[in-house]
Amino acid sequence: MSTILIFEQVLNGLQFGIMLFLMAAGLTLIFGVMGLINLAHGSLYMVGAFAAAWVAGATGSFVFALIAALAAAAAAGALVEIVVIRRLYRAAHLDQVLATFALILIFSEGTRWVFGSFPLFLDIPETLSGPVTLPGGIEYPRYRLTLIGIGIAVALGLWWLTARTRIGIQIRAGENDREMIAALGVDISKLYTLVFALGAALAGLAGALVGAIQSVQVGMGEPVLILAFVVIVIGGIGSIRGAFIGALLVGLTDTLGGIFLPEVFKLFMETGAATQTGSALASMAVYILMSAVLIWRPTGLFGARG
Amino acid sequence: MKTILAAAATAALLASSAAAEVKVGMITTLSGGGAGLGIDVRDGFMLAIKQSGRDDIEVVIEDDQRKPDIAVQLADKMIQSEKVDVLTGIIWSNLAMAVVPAATAQGKFYLSPNAGPSPLAGKGCHPNYFNVAWQNDNLHEAAGAYANTAGYGNSFILAPNYPAGTDALTGYKRFFEGEIANELYTELGQTDYAAEIAQIRASGADSVYFFLPGGMGISFLKQYADSGVDLPVVGPAFSFDQGILQAVGAAALGVVNTSQWNKDIDNPTNAAFVESFQAEYGRLPSLYASQGFDTANLLISAVDAADVSDADAFREALRAANFASTRGDFAFGPNHHPVQTIYAREVVQEGEVFTNKTLGVALENHSDAYAAECKM
C-alpha cells in the first residue's frame, strides 16, 4: 500500500469528517442550548439538498443553489421550532424523540409528495469538477478539496460567533442557565428560534454540498444523522470544538478503518472472507471508538454536562 | 394510498353483485427511499390489467415500507381476511424470503415481479412460486460474460455487504474468466465512495464491476466520474434503470450494463408497452415496470386458461407462460424461473433524456445455477 494511497485516504477521511461537522454543529448547539434531542435534523439536511437541486435545475447556478439550501433549511427550521419544538422544551426526552421522529415521517413523505419518488439531479459546478494534482503526484477531486475549505471556514465562523459576539455570549449563557439569562432580559424564545434556524441552515448547507456528489433522495439524512449523534457524544454535548474534533475522529476512523481492516485480515485469512469480516468490523469501528471515549471520559472529550 | 381497487374491477362490482373471480394481493414498496421501484412495478402491473379490460381480476395494493415485518403482516392480512388467491409485488429479497415460503405453504400462488433470492430458486423452490423477473445472480453472470467478450482481463469488483451483494460478486466471478484485482464489500446504504475509488486508482485493474442499487449507485457514479479514474465500468441494470439515470446525469454516459429488458427490444408487445406506459404515466418505463407488466400478463393468461380454484390446472397454465412478453420469447425453467436472453446495453443521451441502448446479447437463453438443486 503506497504512501500516496494512504495520504489520499486521509484526505477522504478529513473531508467526510468536515461534512459530518456541519451536521453535528447544529445538532450539538440545539442539544446544548435547548436540551432538545432533534431527530428531524436529518430531514433539514434533506430539505437543503432538495432545495439546492430544484434551484440548480431551474437557474443552472450552484451559488444560487447553495443560497436556496441555506434559506430553505433555515426557514424550515424556524417554522418547525415555532410550530412544534417550542412546546417540547419542558417535555421529557422521550416525548421529544417521539415528536421529532414524527417530523421525519412528515418531512419525508411531504418531500416525496412535492418532488416525486425518484432521486433528483444535482451536479457539481463546472469550475470545481475534475481532479487536481497535489504536490507528490496525488490526484484529488477539486470539489472535495473545496468542501474541506468550506467546512474549515464554517468552523472558524462558528468559533468567532460563539466566542466573540453578543449572540454567542447569549448562546453560551443559555447553555448554562436559561432562567438566569431570561431574567437578565434576553428574549429567550427569539434566541432559541435563532439557534434552531442556524443549526438547520448548517444542516441544509451540508445536504446541498454533499448532494452534489451523492444522490438527492428521500431519506438521505437519516444515515448521516446517526453518525452526527455519535460525533456529538464523542465530542461532548454542547461543545462546538468537541463537535469539530469528534467529527474528524469519526471521519478518519470510518474511512481508514474501511480500507485497512480488510487488508489486516488478508494477512491471515483467505481474500473473500477477509474482505467480508474486515468490512463488517470496519462498520463497527466508529461505535467502538465511541465506547472507548465514553469509558475514558463519560461526558465526551469537551463535554461539561453529564 | 391505502387500498386501490382496479378501476375495472370496481366498476364490475358495482354493476353486478358477482365478486371478482381472481383476487390479487400486491405487497410492494411505495414509500421511503426505495419507493421508485415499487411504483414502477405497480404502474406496469396495473397498466396491463387496465389494457386487458377485464372485470374479473381485483387487485389490492399495500405498501410494505421496505420492512420485512410489515410485509409479513400485510401478507397475513391479505391471505386471512382479504382471501386473495395470488400474491405478488415484493421488490426486495429479504422481504421475499420473509413472505413467500409462508404464503406458498398456505396454498397461495406467488408471482415475483422482482426479487429472485437463490434459496427460492434452489432447495427452497415451490410449485406455487413463479419468478417472472430473474434469479438474483442472472444479470451479474451476464456482466461477467460481457466482460470476457469486451476483452477485460483484470476486474476490480465491489458490492454492498449483504446477501444480494455476495450473490452479485459470486455471479460475476462465475462467468468472468480474467483476474480479480480486488474484491470489496461496502456498507449497505453507504453514500461516499472516495475511499473505494482511491483503491481502484491504485489497483492496476483494467475494468470495474459494481453492484450498488438505487441511491448508492448514483453516488458512486457521480464520484467516480469526478475522480479522474477512467477505467471502463460495467454494472447490472439496477444502477442504470430509467428512474435513476436522470439523477446520475452525464456521469453514466457510455457505461455498459446488463438487463433482460430494454425499451428498444424489437417486438410488437414491447413497442406497444413503451408507448402506452409513456402515454399513461408521462415517463419512460424502467425494467421494473416491464417486469410488473409481464407479471400481470402472465396472470391474465393463466386466468384465461384455468380456474384459480383448481390449483393444479392454474399452476399448469402459469407454467405454460402463454403470454406475449415485453422481452420476446419467455419460458420458465424447471424451477419456475425464467430462461431468457440477457442483453448488454449502453447508457446514451436522447435529447434531454438519459436512457439505454441495446448493444448486443450477453447471455443467450440463460437459466440459473440453482435449478439443479430444485426438487418439486
Image: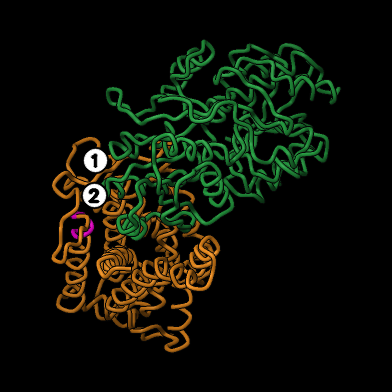
Chain colours: A orange, B green
Query: In the rendered image of this protein, does residue B268 appear above or below residue B193?
Result: above
Letter of the chain that mark 1 sits on in the rendering: A
Q: Which residue is mark 1?
A: A55
Residue at (48% x, 40% y) in the render: B144
Residue at (58% x, 23% y) in the render: B293
B253 vs B341, left or right, is: left
Which stretch is magenta? A142-146
The furthest residue to the bottom: A296
Query: In the rendered image of this protein, does residue B303 appear above or below residue B348?
Result: above
Residue A22 showing in the rendered view: no
Residue B177, magenta (yes or no):
no
Q: In this rendered view, identify the residue nearer to me: B337 or B143.
A: B143
| Identity, as a three-letter code, of the amino acid under mark 1 | Val
Q: Quadrant of the C terminus of chain B?
A: top right
Q: Do tag 2 and tag 1 residues touch (Cβ < 8 Å)?
A: no
Q: Residues within 10 Å of mark 1 (few under 14, many from 20)?
A: many
A252 vs B266, left or right, is: left
Q: In this rendered view, identify the residue nearer to me: B328 or A156.
A: B328
| Identity, as a three-letter code, of the amino acid under mark 2 | Gly
Q: Quadrant of the N terminus of chain B?
A: top right
Letter of the chain that mark 2 sits on in the rendering: B
Q: In this rendered view, identify the residue nearer to me: B280 or A149.
A: A149
* Percent position of residue A66, x then y: 21, 50
Q: Which residue is mark 2?
A: B228
Query: In the rendered image of this protein, does residue B146 appear above or below residue B231?
Result: above
Residue A145, magenta (yes or no):
yes
What SS does tag 2 mark?
A: loop
